[in-house]
Amino acid sequence: MADGQRFAFTKIAVDDLDTQSAFYSAVLGQVVRHRVSGGEGDGEFSEIVMGSPDGDGPSLLLVHHLHRETPPPGEAVLGFTVADVERVVRAVTDAGGVVCAPPRSLPGQALRVARVQDPEGHALEIIQHI
């Protein structure tokens, strides 16, 4: 790998920054690192940068463009590794998300996987190593 190259973040466009950041905090333990606003005209935006509590690893960026329509969900699939996939799936519904495929073991692999959506319909894969 070239010096300084690494995966840094995933950014999704959302309608409601506060609801979405509360979802990712309640369900997946992400914390708000900081908020950013900028741009002008059609490019004006507000953004929340989230990440793991220890500050390690890539960030999740939630962006809201103030003067343009939010694109439909489906532009990305966010993957999260968790300790207890069943607990996280329960938290998804409690926080206003939707379970698309309940937890299941993958044949021949030491994984349990569930597919869910956040309150605005963005796709997430929740993976537990077993």
Image: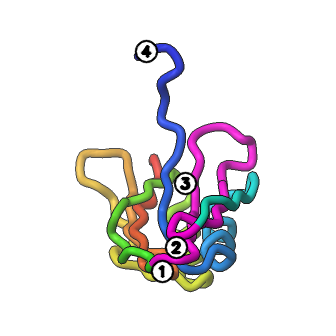
> Residue at label 2?
14
Three-letter code, disc 4: Ala
Three-letter code, disc 3: Val
Looking at the rendering, the stretch of residues picked out in magenta corresponds to: 41-68
Along the viewing direction, whichever of 95 and 122 lies nearer the viewer: 122
Residue 82's tag is: 3
Task: Let me know if residue 67 is in the magenta part.
Answer: yes
Say what secondary structure mark 1 lies in. Answer: loop
* Residues at marks 2 and 1 touching, judged by CB atoms closer than 8 Å: yes
* Residues at marks 2 and 4 touching, judged by CB atoms closer than 8 Å: no
Three-letter code, disc 1: Glu
> Residue at label 1?
120
* Residues at marks 4 and 3 touching, judged by CB atoms closer than 8 Å: no
Rounded to the nearest angstrom, the CA distance separating label 2 from label 1 is: 7 Å
Relative vertical location of residue 17 with respect to residue 76 in this rendering, above or below: below
Rounded to the nearest angstrom, the CA distance separating label 2 from label 4 is: 33 Å
